[in-house]
Amino acid sequence: MASSKKRGAFIVLEGIDRSGKSTQSKKLHEHLTAQKIANQLIRYPDRTTITDCKQNKKLGKLLNEYLQCKQEVDDRAIHLIFSANRHEAKQQLLSWLEEGYTVICDRYSYSGTVYTYSKNVIKRDKMEKEGDKSIKSQKALDWEWCKHVDQGLIQPDVVIYLNVKDLATVKNRGEFGNERYENEAMLKQVLKSYQTFLAEDADKKIWSIVDANQAVEDVHKQIVSITLATIESVASKPVQYL
Ligand code: NYM
Ligand code: MG
């Protein structure tokens, strides 16, 4: 990367299902494009990736079918596949940032950890109640393991967390309940797990909390302002890694 060239910013949006991430990511992309700020909009899981030339779209397709409950996959295996879906795209992401594109990303590594971990907490609670002796096997899905597999990925310059105060808000938004994980018990635990991340990452100063209960346009304005400040502040700084 030529030292005079400004790099793009890596902007991640996180939050529970129906918190408005996709709407806001798209609005941000449209806004930056209208302002002639070079940018790319991506999302995870990327349900379309091709990783096996003999069987097109293997990982993306599998993740999509898993989320739509059309396939059952071992908990550890699927966590690694969600992670691999990010690792395989790392070079492309790095190239974009170095070329000066700001990258808007709808969910990232944080979703990976909080969803797998939350699923495991619920499973363990159930096993404990039922006195299930195989509970030890669930230990391998602890918080650190879930996080660890994403080490080496590019660290976001900012993680914009769309904070919903209670599940009542998202339950009234369209299509809630169609996919795996979109149920109350799970999303309650996911909310708690995001709080754990916020607390753990406090010294990294990359999380920016936005109240998702506000009107769409108000949320958008806040996100634009955070994004523009981030683009400005990281332009001459090196990319960081998880
Ligand atoms: N999800 C997303 C995971 O379980 N692990 C991951 O690594 C990622 C990126 O996929 N309920 C889950 C969270 C969501 C689901 O996301 C699909 P979306 O944004 O609804 O398409
Ligand atoms: Mg969803």
Image (cartoon, rainbow, N blue to C red):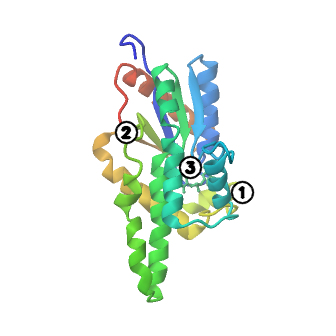
Q: Secondary structure at mark 2?
A: loop
- Badge 3 or badge 1: first in the primary sequence: 1
Q: Is residue 187 in view from this perspective?
A: yes
Residue 12 position (above or below residue 148): above
How many angstroms separate mark 2 from mark 1 (CA)? Answer: 31 Å
Q: Residues within 10 Å of mark 3 (few under 14, many from 20)?
A: some
- Front-most of 7 and 59? 59
Residue depicted at x 34% and y 59%: 144
- Spot the residue most to the top: 4
Q: Relative to residue 161, is residue 39 drawn left or right?
A: right
**Which residue corresponds to mark 3?**
213
Disc 3 Cβ-to-ligand 2 distance below 8 Å = no
**What's the CA distance linking mark 3 and mark 1?**
18 Å
Q: Is residue 133 left or right of residue 34?
A: left
Task: Give residue 118's position: percent from left, percent from top.
Answer: 47, 65
Alpha carbon distance from label 2 to label 3: 22 Å
Residue of label 1: 175
Q: Which of the four quarters of the rendered structure image does ligand 2 lie in?
A: bottom right
* Front tag of 2 and 3: 2
Residue at coordinates 46% horizontally, 48% vertically from top-left? 109
Q: Residues within 10 Å of mark 1 (few under 14, many from 20)?
A: few
Task: Tell me, for residue 206, which label it has, or none.
Answer: 2
> Looking at the rendering, in which quadrant would you find the C terminus?
top left
Q: Position of residue 57 (x, y in %)?
A: 67, 46
